[in-house]
Amino acid sequence: MWVLVMIEGLTFAAYFVVYTYFYRQSPDLFLASQAHLDLTLGVVNTIILLTSSWSIARCVERSRAGDYKAALRNVLLTMAGGFLFAGIKLYEWSVEIGRGFTFTTNTFFSFYYFLTGIHLLHIIVGSIALFVVIHQLSSPARRAQEIIETGATYWHMVDFLWVIIFALLYVMR
Amino acid sequence: MTAALARPVAAAAPATSRLGRIAWNWRHNPKLELWLAWYTILVFYNIFGIVFFVMTRSQPPPKAWWSLPRMVQWFADNEWGLLVGFGIIFAMGAFATASTALITYSIRRMSVSPAFAYTYLILYSLAAVPGMLLTCIALVVGAMRLDRDPALMGSLYDMGFIAFSGTMGIFLVGSVIWAVAILLDTNRIFPRWFGYFNICNALTEVVVATCVIEKSGPFAWDGIISFYVNMVVFGIYTGVFITLLRKMIEREDFTAGSPLSQHRRPHAI
Amino acid sequence: MGISAQARLALGWLLLTGITLFAWWMGSSHGPGPLRPDPAVAAGAIAITVVKVRVIIMEFMDARHAPRRLRYLTDSFLALFVIAMLATYRFA
């Protein structure tokens, strides 16, 4: 799974460098567009994802200790965090589209929808991974520690990718 | 233990001349078909690269935002490269199926249901050959008669490049199928990290989708993100899977479960 | 080993959330009128992001206890990322 983390990390790093390059090509356009984003929603989403990362880390710690009930509670919490994140993200998109900012509005918004969109796709894949973890934890016949930790690793990657996206799209100027 | 294993596979080719060893392998090596398929993949991808990148210059793709006269100009500039290069693909493009076949074989070797292999086979048969050939056909038709109505030439131009990028979606699903098969497989035909790499490849190929909306910039069919970053990942992925297929063939020992375990080599031609 | 694993994770979360709130302040700390490019904010955003990512990798993903090679790999990746981002910002 670390192979996936490294490859996706490098790929996204390429996206981020390209974004920064395009930002420097038309800083005024980017900044004017960035002003239309809701920083507060971005912060809320970041904290939700950080919390979900915390809970999946706790899930791993608890399952290592053999406390599978607590581990299951934590992964369900993580899943809830993921859904909440996705819901807020979709709401945020609806607001931006309502204001008339779509993928084709300008380069900044192309990047905005692209980065948040591909990240959302990773969240969806992550939800599948979390389903697998839940499935593993919910029966004493399974509970393979390796699978649980693999799913958790993927989720942490989703989290740290968002941390960078947030900084670039919402904060950096 | 099958009779095929009773054949002295371990007895290497006699230490005669190179030609002698090749002849011996042709007659006796039970992995012959696998190696033929693998070398075909190698030959095919090299020719593919030379044709698409050098002869026809259709990769990296030209701009999507050009005016019709400029598109006609592109056909004219690359006329002979297109005609000869894609003519070569018409003749031997079907060798691309060796890759699909060998990967399908590798999935059949796994402990998962054969349905994975058949799905992969169908997907790639639907994607790789038409996806590549449709581009070739569209661009050759354009190059064939340069005095066509420019609007028609524009259609052929768009069709050629969209066909190439549009079929990424099927490759993507194929990658997911292969990934799931690898991750569920208990025979360890491929290392688990390659299953994850397949997921990476799938996730990266998604970015091609934006090229139908954007005609310029990083998300166009020749954009930095939709084309170049995607191609780098795909290129590395291709190199990796070709290497892993080779390792798989080397490790092949025809134990029970292999589609080849009941294979009796007919007398060589 | 002073603190428990659970406490360590909680502290990590606290640190990450704190940094996020600081980033929030940084992002909203501009005067009225249109936003202007601000290299200090950009560098700050990139720096604190890398700190956050490193905390996630080391604490949450447990790379602290991983083989040294993995830690070197992730740290090199982060270093490369910072350099690439700052260089692009500066020279693009």
Image: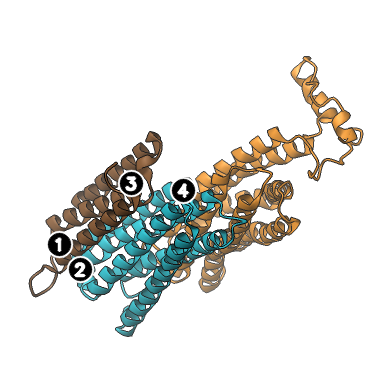
Instruction: Find disc 4 in the rendering and name its residue.
Output: B232
Q: Is residue B52 visible?
A: yes
The mark found on residue C58 in the picture is 3
| Left or right of residue B162: residue A91 | left
Badge 2 amino acid: Leu
Q: Is residue B217 above or below residue A143?
A: below
Same-chain check, marks 3 and 2: no
Image-based side of B207 in relation to B126, left or right = left
- Give the alpha-carbon distance from disc 4 to disc 3, as whole Å: 29 Å
Label 4 is found on which chain of the structure? B
Drawing shade for chain A: cyan
**In the rendering, at what x and y percent does residue B196 appear?**
53, 50
Quote the CA–CA distance across marks 4 and 1: 32 Å
Q: Which three-letter amino acid code belongs to the residue tagged 4?
A: Val
Q: Quadrant of the C terminus of chain A?
A: bottom left
**Labels 1 and 3: the sequence-earlier one:** 1
Residue bearing mark 1:
C37
- Residue farthest toward the left in the current orientation of the protein: C31
Taking the image as shown, residue B203 lies to the left or right of residue A158, namely: right
Seen as rendered, the residue at the extreme bottom is A98
Q: Which of the chains bears the disc numbered 3?
A: C
Residue B141 placed where, x, y %? 62, 63
Chain B is shown in which shade? orange
Write down the chain letter for disc 1: C
Please identify, in this view, whether the residue under mark 3 or under mark 2 is nearer the observer.
3
Depth check, mark 1 against mark 3: the one in front is 3
What colour do you see for chain C? brown
Q: Which residue is mark 2?
A: A31
